């Protein structure tokens, strides 16, 4: 399941209705996996609030996969992280949009940034670099490009061979080639021994498209943009209608194939 726009409104807590539905799904034996564009440090508090302490999380749009482990010093173990050389990305972005803000992820800590981001925009700590070349001193899992017209960079970035995902009008996430939430989830599915026919995905955003298409039961939230809904096989209610909880209740009740009431 996606987090922002699916389990909670950005900046809000998970509703008690949705939290109870997640707990019921876990109790029924389902593997509940959070799959988000958030960084690991941003996803962990949501997992804790949901009582998820021994499952899996996919973060940074599939660039990082971690196993929750209460016995580990930080409560998790990073299982896989895919990195890339961010230098060509930053140089291209600055050449085309000199005012673009750039952040590169430091897994489990926060971001190195060219300009400080609002605390509501990125999770964790921030370190402002003095020179742009400090950003590509080592391979990174993800870069964020933010600012007016930044979505104009998507095609040129793709031509560089990286994965460029617009998450908002003024926001693009950049990760290693060929990554998505779906690629990470399929790896977890294989490790858990889950049949592809027994996969369900719930999401609402542009970065959920591959995940919705990958799952046997891909369910888009009712408020998702129409192009996102086109990747899903079903549509549930909006976040204010507790659409994710509706899907989870259907699973617990043993709906197979998954039947959902038509949203109002």
Image: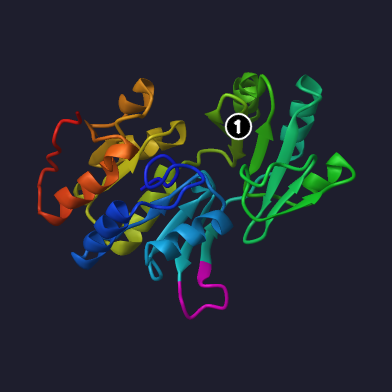
Query: What kind of element bears circle 1?
Result: strand
Magenta region, residue range: 69-77
The quadrant where residue 234 appears: top left
User: Which residue is found at the position 37% from the left and 47% from the top?
Assistant: 7
- Give the residue at the far bottom of this rendering: 71
Whether 194 is drawn above or below 219: the answer is below
Whether 136 is drawn above or below 238: the answer is below
Q: Is residue 162 visible?
A: no
Q: Is residue 59 visible?
A: yes
The quadrant where residue 148 appears: top right
Q: Is residue 260 left or right of residue 199?
A: left
User: Which residue is found at the position 47% from the left and 41% from the top?
Assistant: 180
Residue 237, given in percent of the width and then of the height, sits at: 25, 35
Look at the image and say whether residue 10 sits in the magenta stretch: no
Q: Residue tagged by mark 1?
A: 172
Whether 42 is drawn above or below 84: the answer is below
Q: How many marks?
A: 1
């Amino acid at each position: 399941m996606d987090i922002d726009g699916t389990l909670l409104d950005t900046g809000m807590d998970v509703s008690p209705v949705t939290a109870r539905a997640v707990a019921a799904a876990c109790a029924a034996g389902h593997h509940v996996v959070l799959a988000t564009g958030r960084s690991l440090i941003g996803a962990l508090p949501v997992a804790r609030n949901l009582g998820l302490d021994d499952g899996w999380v996919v973060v940074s749009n599939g660039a990082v996969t971690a196993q929750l482990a209460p016995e580990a010093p930080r409560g998790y173990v990073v299982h896989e992280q895919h990195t890339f050389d961010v230098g060509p990305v930053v140089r291209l972005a600055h050449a085309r949009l000199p005012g673009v803000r750039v952040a590169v992820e430091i897994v489990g800590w926060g971001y190195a940034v060219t300009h400080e981001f609002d605390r509501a925009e990125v999770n964790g700590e921030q370190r402002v670099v003095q020179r742009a070349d400090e950003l590509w001193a080592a391979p990174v899992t993800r870069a964020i490009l933010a600012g007016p017209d930044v979505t104009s960079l998507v095609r040129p970035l793709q031509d560089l061979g990286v994965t460029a995902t617009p998450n908002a009008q003024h926001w693009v996430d950049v990760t290693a080639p060929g990554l998505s939430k779906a690629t990470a989830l399929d790896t977890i599915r294989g490790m858990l021994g889950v049949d592809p026919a027994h996969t369900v995905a719930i999401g609402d955003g542009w970065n959920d498209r591959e995940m919705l298409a990958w799952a046997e039961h891909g369910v888009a939230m009712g408020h998702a943009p129409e192009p996102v809904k086109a990747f899903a096989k079903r549509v549930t209610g909006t976040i204010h209608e507790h659409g994710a909880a509706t899907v989870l209740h259907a699973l617990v009740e043993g709906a197979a194939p998954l039947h959902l009431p038509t949203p109002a």
